[in-house]
Amino acid sequence: MSASCGLCGRDLEDGYLCPGDTLALAERLERMPKAYAALAGFLAPASAPPGERVSGSGGSRLPVNEAVLDLRYGGIALVLESWLSDVQASRGWGQPAIQGGVEERVRRAARSLSANLEWVASSYPAAGDLAREVREMEGAALSIVGAAPDRGRRIGQCVAVDASGVVCGATIRHQRGETKLVCPWCGYVYEERDFLTLARLQPEEAS
Ligand SMILES: [Zn+2]
Ligand SMILES: [Zn+2]
């Protein structure tokens, strides 16, 4: 029987997710609680430039960033938990216990899914959909965190590539006095000698 990866389509001897995408999924699950925590800093709506703050107008706007709200209260935890629940059901196991605050739920569900990854890659037909949804969710979180107001000079986007060949793309900033840059997302470290390489590898600015 021939098989193919449910995410990238690569041919596999058997199973449902290639080793690269399985590793990338493991990395994303490990980062997910951090993504969740990072979103906390972005609950306030993007502030309007000072001159555009007209009092008395825009009274219907919620005082929070709704995209962040969706991901933090529900989004991440619910998506991970529903996949975990389906994985456990497919294995003939009982349903996962859901308890604790949202942060705790994100951590538990991500950890439990990680613990099932070997089985998911080899025996779970929906593995590709699971990997895709986790990747999209991380992308959504990253687009919010990456669009942060200025915190240091923006150097460019992280060019580190994960195991499945996806470029990180998080915004890398330089604070005065720093001699190396650490990607806030994937943790990749750029030493000073890498700064030029980083600059050279920047994707074309979309204008
Ligand atoms: Zn693949
Ligand atoms: Zn990165």
Image (spheres, rainbow, N blue to C red):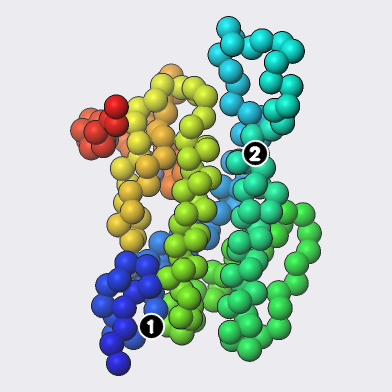
Q: Quadrant of residue 21?
A: bottom left
The answer to whether 84 is drawn above or below residue 138 in the figure is below
Please tell me which residue is depicted at 50% across the width and 46% down the height of the picture. 140
Q: Indicate which label's residue lies in the foreground, 2 or 1.
A: 2
- Residue at point 58%, 7% (across, down): 51
Q: Which residue is mark 2?
A: 66
Pointer 1: what residue? 15
Q: Residue at x 46, y 48 (%)?
A: 139
Q: What percent of the width, then of the height, locates residue 203?
A: 26, 37
Please tell me whether mark 1 sits on a helix, a strand or a loop: loop
Quarter of the rendered structure image containing ligand 2: top left
Q: Is residue 37 left or right of residue 150?
A: right
Earlier in the chain: of badge 2 and badge 1, it is: 1
Q: Which mark is residue 42?
A: none
Quarter of the image that includes the C terminus: top left
Q: Position of residue 112 (x, y in %)?
A: 61, 70
| Residue shown at 43% from the left, 77% from the top | 121
| Residue 38 visible (yes or no) | yes
Picture coordinates of residue 39, whole percent (x, y): 60, 41
